[in-house]
Amino acid sequence: MHKLIETNGLTYYYRKGTKDEVKALDSVNMAVYKGEMLSITGQNGSGKSTLARHFNALLKPGQGSILIKGLSTANKDSIPEIRKIIGMVFQNPDNQLVSSIVEEDIAFGPENLGLPQAEIIDRVDWALETLNLEDLRREPPHNLSEGQKQQVAIAGVLAMKPECIVLDEPTAHLDPRGRREVLESAIRLNREEGITIVLLTHFMSEVVHCDRMLVMEGGAVKMDGSPEKVFRQSAEIKSAGLDFPVASQVAEGLRREGFKIKPDIVRTEELIDCLCQLKS
């Protein structure tokens, strides 16, 4: 598989050289592959957000390196191209909404790229349609729900047509409906549009929909693999302070009661299918 992002010995300190120095990343070696949907999870302070901020050169390595399609973030001349490749959506959408009307907000990024007006209009229309936001085109962002605001923030990044979108805890402050809508949009962008998605989250219900997951602890990558593979390592999951998906917990409980439930169930749909097969 083609590596879109690659880190080698990536180390980063906050307040380096002071008495309050903190090593936020500790020799991280990882990769993001083109076309995949990757989740990065871990407790607060595990280093996942610090790692994500290196992906589009918001932070520069203290030691080691990070390459985006072979471009080093340490080379300032490469940063404009890197930021075309990697789009970022943050936890609080209000920090990314800059205009008084939704369609103008989505147009902001393409305008900054210096695109012709006709192409800007086409991109705004495409982003609105892709995320099913056409009905909100003329709405002021302050009238939207938090989930809708986050969708508009994603649309604004999408309109710039990056190869990869990094979603940094995008559902942390949303209600269940908002979380579901944002997750469904991320899945659709990955599966239907072929956009690489990196999802930072502490919700295991979101992690299980990804192709691969990284578990971070103490600034380092502790586990890397498919959700089925990672959640099989129960001791390590507990050590990292993470929960198991609800479907995994229910399946384990049923197995203890003697039901023939297959191992490695992490998704609700898989559990339902398994139970239906038992009934038949």
Image (tube, grey):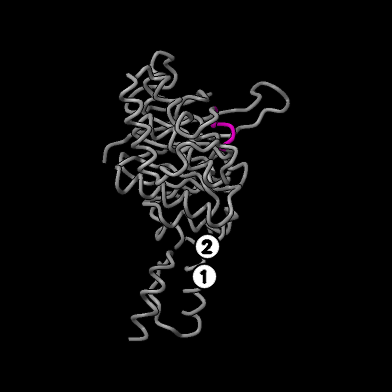
Mark 1 in CB contact with mark 2 (< 8 angstroms): yes
Q: At x 35% / y 22%, what residue is drawn?
A: 71
- Secondary structure at badge 1 equals helix
Q: At x 46% / y 85%, what residue is drawn?
A: 258
Picture coordinates of residue 236 (x, y %)? 53, 57
Mark 2 highlights which residue? 244
Q: At x 54% / y 31%, what residue is drawn?
A: 96
Number of on-image labels: 2
Q: Is residue 219 visible?
A: no
Going by the picture, which residue comes out furthest to the left?
1
Is disc 2 surrounded by few (<14), some (14 to 19) or many (20+) residues within 10 Å? some
Give yes or no for residue 87 being in the magenta stretch: no
Report the quarter where the C terminus lies. bottom left
- Secondary structure at badge 2 equals loop
Is disc 1 surrounded by few (<14), some (14 to 19) or many (20+) residues within 10 Å? some
Mark 1 highlights which residue? 249
User: Which of the two labelled residues, at mark 1 and mark 2, occupies the earlier sequence position?
Assistant: 2
Picture coordinates of residue 119 (x, y %)? 31, 25
